[in-house]
Image (cartoon, rainbow, N blue to C red):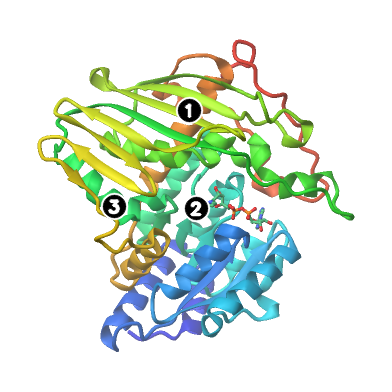
Amino acid sequence: MIIKDNSRRDFVKKTGSAVLASSLGLNILSARSKASGINSETIKVGLIGCGGRGTGAALQATRADSNVVLTVMADIFEDTLKESHSALMGENPEKIKVDPANMFIGFDAYKKVLDSDVDVVLLTTPPSFRPGHLRAAIEAGKHVFCEKPVAVDAPGIRHVIESAKMAKMKGLALMSGFCWRHDDPKNATFARLLDGAIGDIHTVYNTYNTGELWFKDRQPGWNDFQTTIRNWLYYNWLSGDHITEQAVHSLDMMSWAFGDVMPISATGTGGRQSRTEDKFGNVYDHFAIVFDYPDGKKGFHFSRQQKNCSRAYGLDITGDKGRCNIHVSNNHEIIGKKNWKWEDDKKERNDMYQTEHNELFASIRAGKPFNDGIMMAHSTLLAIWGRMAAYTGQTISFEEALNSNETLGPDLNAYSWDLRWPLKDVAQPGITKFA
Ligand SMILES: NC(=O)c1ccc[n+]([C@@H]2O[C@H](COP(=O)([O-])OP(=O)(O)OC[C@H]3O[C@@H](n4cnc5c(N)ncnc54)[C@H](O)[C@@H]3O)[C@@H](O)[C@H]2O)c1
């Protein structure tokens, strides 16, 4: 059965059956590619959230396959969308086919991307929007690239888990932005670890200790909310705090080392010592969390965003037959049954961001959609869970963390430039309650 792109769109509208439409769309894409030569069907991509990561992801998407074009872009700010578009035109002009009529601005701009005929959407806004955007994308029958973290609170995680299951049922690809899982040295190292290279792993110490991040000074014409959302990192209802927004990468690798088994409980501490001005919203600048795993195993997490302090971004993993040291960018070493080292100088290292997109698009072409949705939800939950333990000063079990009813931000439909979302006080352990 050959159905042209337009008739596919009409079909979707007429039946109103998203399930049928999405699986049909997928089959057409892969069947056509197979029938008439590799990549004969153009894959159209839409970008939602045109900041730094979104622009990078759009570039990687358009380089992932010989017949992919970016056709629709959405952001809440016109200036960021325009900057992103011109950066993309500078890099890969023949793959950027975004008419001005397909550039959408505003909190409902994502809906216009999903109403368009794109096959794949890239979700790269601040994390608070992710659960709502993801669900809408899956309901619209789109394949998704979903940046980490995928939520800022436990209700968001539960919503994402449901969406991941829906994507699977509908035959839609769902690829997370947990990019280290696509890095060659990490894959080589974790494959050996999971194959017993250091015996039974009993502790994973992981760090994300870095300096301070960017801040955007208020410009003429920005109201309070515009200034807040431009500086979304510093508001836990938008970012989930820095353990969720940034250090989640280290927690994701801790989870990988433990075979993606979830811990039993988390206990932690944290606070705000050096980044204390009001302009830095209500986030902490350091966290230290202990995760208790079955059989007495432990994951120790330490993250900070404080300037003029020593930096570390890696894992020290101990097993009953050896140990493994990973510094994420330049050192991967196993001292165990058989010593081993990734030799950067001898092997060409891949670009993990490009690899994740290559794998996503190849899986769509092959009709075997990649889906790491449950993993991305669990890894993000580790960060939210650690934050809840540190904010409250309580030991929190897996069930309590997953079933927490604390919602940090407003419903997706409540967003407008008139929104005045109350800023919660900086959390105080022993006073801030677990909810
Ligand atoms: N995997 C990685 O290594 C990596 C690296 C950097 C960032 N990230 C993640 O990517 C996401 C984006 O980060 P960034 O650094 O690009 O931030 P950014 O501020 O540069 O970009 C976010 C963009 O989203 C837009 N936006 C905000 N709300 C929106 C909405 N409701 N609808 C549409 N657009 C909206 C903003 O205007 C901005 O252009 C975050 O979740 C971040 O954690 C991942």
Quickly name the residue at label 2. Answer: 147
Is disc 1 surrounded by few (<14), some (14 to 19) or many (20+) residues within 10 Å?
many
Ligand 1 within 8 angstroms of badge 2 C-beta:
yes
Residue farthest to the left?
337
Quickly name the residue at label 3. Answer: 185
**Amino acid type for the residue under numbered disc 3:** Pro
Residue farthest to the bottom?
36
- The secondary structure type at the circle numbered 3 is helix
Residue farthest to the top?
430
| Residue 251: percent from left, percent from top | 41, 36
Judging depth in this view, the residue of 35 and 315 nearest the camera is 315
| Proximity of marks 3 and 2: CB atoms separated by less than 8 Å | no
Q: Determine the residue positioned at 45% across, 49% down.
A: 163
**Amino acid type for the residue under numbered disc 2:** Glu
Residue 374 visible to an observer of this rendering: yes
Left or right of 257 on screen, residue 106: right
Q: Determine the residue positioned at 32% across, 41% down.
A: 326
| Residue 60: percent from left, percent from top | 46, 68
- The secondary structure type at the circle numbered 2 is loop
Residue 404 visible to an observer of this rendering: no
Judging depth in this view, the residue of 159 and 17 nearest the camera is 159
Q: CA distance from mark 3 to mark 1?
A: 28 Å
Q: For residue 175, which quarter of the picture?
A: bottom left
Q: CA distance from mark 3 to mark 2?
A: 21 Å
Left or right of 64 on screen, residue 129: right
Is disc 2 surrounded by few (<14), some (14 to 19) or many (20+) residues within 10 Å?
many
**Amino acid type for the residue under numbered disc 1:** Trp
Judging depth in this view, the residue of 344 and 40 nearest the camera is 344
Quickly name the residue at label 1. Answer: 385
- The secondary structure type at the circle numbered 1 is helix
- Which quadrant of the figure contains the N terminus? bottom left
Is disc 3 surrounded by few (<14), some (14 to 19) or many (20+) residues within 10 Å?
many
